[in-house]
Image: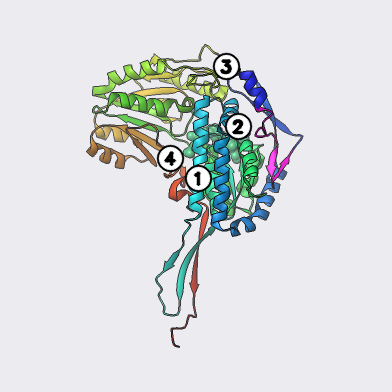
């Protein structure tokens, strides 16, 4: 059945392996392999762009900019809406492409496709609500206004963990604002990005407005971060690469949006609803096999509920079905590569050496390859690597705490500040703890918060700027203050 899926998808018009630049598909001799993490089989050889291709894509985006920026917002909105409709109409094929290159279960992949599509819908509406200001004047002969205008050519660099959804989160507001874009997708997962470009073409996105250049991170990334024609760089990925890009982009004072790593705490208080806390922890910890930036990385459980929570989480996690994401009922697929497997192993070994114990899982799965058992560890402490670093895998470390002050101190004890979660039935505590947490996103009695209409982004070293919601489009706009003098008074 899976071989049939593959045979049918590679004949689909959405299965693209060349660059998309200036509205044309560009084949290159230099190519790189993309494999299926579930099997290790190479599924495509994708054109590998470098310096010249990145520069050509920027030139195409620059050429397309004036006409796109001048289009009435209503027309840009209509094109984005068509793009949205085409993504939704092709959601099953897009989900299969995503599962083949990334590994997540098909149902989760389809969820990602629809979540991503929702950004086209949301920002199609926002395109028509880019208002300026009329400012009360300071002189009788002057009128003061603030315009909001597109920032210009934008560059986007996206990660492999959400190969599709991270793209509309950037491209939809950029295009809605009147900007054009060059995208470099992650090398592990370029096929979803290219499929999205095929749908952009069909939806009538004009040539050069949206360009996709997979290839060398160093070469393409360097051009996107340093070329003076690029006015804005929007990046989602690791804090390490984000920091390096920030330094390189400083040469041309580019505007930046950075969505970086996380080290999300979950706080489970004694008064929590146990079932909700377990279900919410699973939702945040094990989605995408623990490979999300908002994944729970540290689970702090109050003394009184601790033992019941550990037992219930262990039972629920042990029951998860693991396998190829294409198989029905599978909720845990493979990890992206063997380095991810090695990182889980290293974090578990370090935790066990420091006194932690395995509740369930604990190592590689019998399926072999990149499959890793969903794992729960108890008796973890703040000194362990698992508390300090993002594991980015299906390992749930549990720590014990006593009281609100202790919980807040432990949760904030990190240089990251993306997402945090708390489970409690005390409404006063929701406010006290919610306000004290130094994080950009706080989920209360839920492990799933993402919504295209809400601001997504991190505090501290988790990033700069916001994606989604009202804030998302302002990232792609410049403000221009116009002071109009010489307006003679009535009757003069
Ligand atoms: P990554 O290694 O930083 O890669 C992200 C992107 O940057 C890829 O397209 C990669 O290209 C590119 N890249 C790598 N080195 C580069 C360089 N020197 N110059 C320019 N571009 C470069 O991150 P990842 O492993 O793919 O993703 C996982 C990380 O992303 C985690 O830390 C996670 O928390 C974070 N993340 C954050 C959010 C958020 O919204 N805050 C969302 C999702 C993920 P290649 O693939 O070609 O190397």
Could you tell me which residue is drawn at 30 percent across and 39 percent down?
434
- Crowding at label 3, few (<14), some or many (≥20) Cα neighbours within 10 Å? some
Q: Position of residue 50 (x, y in %)?
A: 70, 40
Marks 1 and 2 sit apart, C-alpha to C-alpha, by 24 Å
Quarter occupied by residue 46: top right
Q: Earlier in the sequence, mark 1 or mark 4?
A: 1
Question: Given this view, does label 1 or label 2 mark the residue nearer the observer?
Answer: 1
- Crowding at label 1, few (<14), some or many (≥20) Cα neighbours within 10 Å? many
Q: Earlier in the sequence, mark 2 or mark 4?
A: 2
Instruction: Tell me which segment is drawn in magenta.
Output: 9-26
Could you tell me which residue is drawn at 53 percent across and 34 percent down?
113
Marks 2 and 4 sit apart, C-alpha to C-alpha, by 23 Å
Q: Earlier in the sequence, mark 3 or mark 4?
A: 3
> Residue tagged by mark 2?
189
Marks 3 and 4 sit apart, C-alpha to C-alpha, by 34 Å
Magenta-colored segment: predominant secondary structure: loop
21 magenta-colored = yes
> Residue tagged by mark 1?
121
- Crowding at label 4, few (<14), some or many (≥20) Cα neighbours within 10 Å? some
Name the residue at the top extreme.
Answer: 366
Label 4 SS: loop
Residue 369 bears which disc, if any?
3
Say whether residue 362 is left or right of residue 69: left
Question: Given this view, does label 3 or label 4 mark the residue nearer the observer?
Answer: 4
Q: Is residue 381 visible?
A: no
Label 3 SS: loop
370 magenta-colored = no
Say whether residue 421 is left or right of residue 370: left
Query: What is the number of callouts on the image?
Result: 4
Say whether residue 270 is left or right of residue 14: left
Question: Given this view, does label 2 or label 4 mark the residue nearer the observer?
Answer: 4
Label 1 SS: helix
């Amino acid at each position: 059945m899976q071989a049939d899926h593959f045979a049918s998808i590679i004949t689909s018009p959405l299965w693209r392996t060349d660059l998309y630049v200036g509205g044309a598909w560009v084949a290159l001799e230099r190519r790189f392999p993309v494999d299926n993490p579930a099997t290790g089989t190479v599924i495509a050889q994708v054109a590998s762009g470098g310096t010249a291709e990145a520069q050509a894509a920027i030139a195409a985006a620059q050429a397309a900019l004036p006409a796109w920026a001048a289009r009435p917002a209503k027309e840009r909105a209509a094109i984005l809406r068509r793009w949205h409709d085409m993504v939704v109409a092709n959601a099953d094929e897009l989900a299969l492409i995503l599962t083949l290159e990334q590994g997540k279960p098909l149902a989760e992949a389809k969820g990602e496709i629809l979540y991503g599509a929702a950004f086209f819908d949301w920002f199609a509406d926002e395109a028509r609500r880019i208002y300026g200001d009329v400012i009360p004047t300071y002189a009788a002969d002057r009128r003061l206004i603030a315009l909001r205008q597109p920032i210009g050519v934008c560059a986007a660099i996206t990660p492999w963990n959400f190969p599709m959804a991270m793209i509309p989160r950037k491209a939809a507001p950029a295009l809605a604002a009147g900007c054009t874009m060059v995208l470099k997708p992650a090398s592990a997962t370029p096929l979803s990005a290219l499929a999205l470009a095929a749908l952009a073409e069909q939806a009538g996105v004009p040539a050069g407005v949206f360009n996709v250049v997979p290839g060398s991170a160093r070469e393409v990334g360097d051009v996107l971060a340093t070329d003076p024609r690029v006015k804005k760089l929007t990046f989602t990925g690791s804090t390490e690469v984000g920091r390096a890009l920030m330094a390189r982009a400083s040469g041309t004072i580019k505007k930046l949006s950075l969505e970086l790593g996380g080290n999300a705490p979950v706080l489970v208080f004694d008064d929590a609803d146990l079932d909700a806390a377990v279900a919410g922890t699973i939702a945040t910890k094990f989605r995408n096999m623990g490979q999300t930036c908002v994944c729970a990385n540290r689970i702090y459980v109050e003394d009184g509920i601790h033992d019941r929570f550990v037992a219930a989480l262990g039972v629920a996690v042990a029951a998860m079905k693991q396998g190829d994401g294409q198989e029905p009922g599978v909720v845990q697929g493979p990890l992206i590569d063997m380095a991810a497997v090695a990182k889980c192993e290293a974090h578990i070994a370090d935790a066990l050496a420091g006194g932690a114990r395995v509740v369930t899982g604990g190592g590689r799965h019998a399926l072999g390859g990149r499959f890793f058992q969903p794992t729960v560890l108890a008796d973890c402490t703040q000194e362990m690597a698992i508390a300090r670093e993002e594991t980015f895998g299906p390992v749930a470390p549990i720590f014990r705490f006593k009281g609100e002050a202790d919980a807040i101190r432990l949760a904030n004890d990190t240089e990251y500040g993306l997402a945090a979660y708390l489970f409690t039935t005390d409404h006063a505590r929701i406010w006290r703890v919610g306000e004290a947490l130094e994080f950009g996103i706080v989920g209360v009695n839920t492990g799933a918060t993402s919504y295209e209409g809400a601001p997504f982004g991190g505090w501290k070293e988790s990033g700069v700027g916001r994606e989604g919601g009202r804030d998302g489009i302002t990232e792609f706009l410049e403000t221009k203050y116009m002071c109009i003098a010489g307006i003679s008074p009535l009757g003069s």
